Image (tube, rainbow, N blue to C red):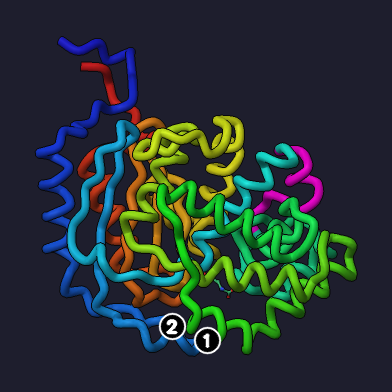
């Protein structure tokens, strides 16, 4: 008889056979979903093949599982914000991020100017554009080139390989990012931009154009799941404390104004990007990511949300799922 007064997190089956089975199931179940539409406010993103569909899961012991299209790359977009946040947490510590940027959800669209104006540049967070551009402006480096080099290196370290920029996406967005420039200037007006606003926006735009596949994103997520050590390369990228302060902001703001719905349904910190990438972190266990460009109205990949939610449910890894001890 089980002791019904005693509750614990549900045991999960992370065996090779089970993970492979679940990724196959999820792929088959959702491959024909036709909902959603590529982002087109960045012109080049409208030209990306909407049928790209790749899934990857990387465990904290470094085992890599993939299904579907892992060869095709998409631009990382907002997913990069997580790793720039981790980078400045490493450099400045948690209190500075809370004071200089903020760590509260804005409740409005990721590129909202109103959010900045309403809060006089405060109460934003590094997962939405204003906080992310402020975060980029805080990265150490003597000039723009040095800051960019260090950002690209950090993102690459998380992924475990040298990442490169998708030039057409960068050029397309850089020629058309007046809204982000306006945000950066408004932050400057409120004393919350920490480098030249035009250059900070340019570095931010370049960081968003870094090319990744599902395996890269899952490895980046797995590095967070593994306390900051990349489980594939075994290299220490950030400290456990940095991970501890990054994940809650992903939980509250990782999927923009649908962050609450996502967290309610999965219990896992996650981050999406308008390129169609979405990663989620299961602390101590694994990172999972999906690449599929068509997005819902909030700007999150439709298929990616479905796949990750399915796998998380089947594995029973929602940390809030507490059951009577057997
Ligand atoms: N949500 C996103 O992925 C947005 C990133 C994009 N580069 C922008 O600034 O609009």
Residue at 42%, 38% (x, y): give it. 230
Image side of residue 235 versus residue 127, left or right: left
Cβ at disc 1 under 8 Å from ligand 1: yes
Q: Position of residue 31 (x, y in %)?
A: 17, 69
80 shown above or below 91: below
Q: Position of residue 165 (x, y in %)?
A: 49, 70
Residue at 37%, 36% (x, y): give it. 231
Residue at 47%, 56% (x, y): give it. 271
Q: Which residues are magenta?
A: 94-105
Residue 319, by quadrant, is top left
| Location of mark 2 (residue) | 45
Confirm or deny contact between disc 2 and disc 1 (CB under 8 A).
Answer: yes
Q: Position of residue 134 (x, y in %)?
A: 74, 61
- Locate the N terminus and report the quarter of the image it occupies: top left
Residue at 51%, 48% (x, y): give it. 251
> For this rendering, which residue is in front, 195 or 20?
195
121 shown above or below 99: below
Measured Cα–Cα span from mark 2 to mark 1: 8 Å
86 shown above or below 192: above
């Amino acid at each position: 008889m089980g002791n019904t007064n005693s509750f614990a997190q549900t045991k999960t089956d992370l065996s090779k056979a089970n993970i492979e089975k679940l990724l196959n199931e999820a792929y088959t179940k959702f491959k024909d979903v036709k909902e959603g539409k590529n982002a087109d406010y960045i012109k080049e993103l409208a030209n990306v093949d909407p049928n790209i569909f790749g899934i990857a899961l990387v465990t904290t012991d470094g085992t890599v599982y993939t299904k579907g299209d892992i060869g095709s790359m998409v631009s990382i977009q907002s997913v990069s914000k997580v790793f720039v946040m981790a980078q400045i947490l490493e450099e400045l510590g948690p209190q500075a991020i809370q004071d200089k940027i903020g760590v509260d959800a804005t409740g409005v669209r990721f590129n909202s100017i109103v959010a900045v104006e309403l809060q006089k540049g405060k109460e934003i967070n590094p997962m939405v554009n204003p906080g992310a551009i402020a975060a980029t402006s805080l990265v150490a480096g003597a000039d723009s080139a040095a800051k960019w080099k260090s950002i690209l290196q950090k993102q690459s370290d998380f992924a475990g390989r040298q990442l490169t920029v998708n030039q057409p996406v960068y050029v397309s967005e850089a020629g058309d990012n007046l809204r982000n420039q306006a945000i950066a200037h408004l932050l400057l007006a409120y004393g919350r931009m920490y480098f030249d606003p035009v250059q900070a926006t340019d570095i931010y735009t370049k960081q968003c154009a870094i090319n990744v596949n599902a395996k890269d994103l899952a490895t980046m997520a797995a590095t967070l799941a593994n306390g900051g050590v990349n489980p594939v390369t075994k290299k220490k990228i950030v400290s456990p404390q940095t991970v501890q302060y990054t994940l809650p902001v992903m939980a509250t703001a990782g999927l923009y104004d649908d962050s609450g719905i996502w967290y309610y349904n999965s219990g896992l910190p996650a981050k999406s990007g308008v390129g169609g990438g979405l990663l989620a972190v299961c602390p101590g266990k694994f990172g999972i990511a999906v690449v599929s460009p068509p997005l819902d109205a909030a700007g999150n990949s439709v298929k990616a949300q479905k796949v990750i939610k399915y796998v998380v449910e089947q594995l029973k890894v929602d940390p809030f799922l507490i059951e009577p001890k057997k």
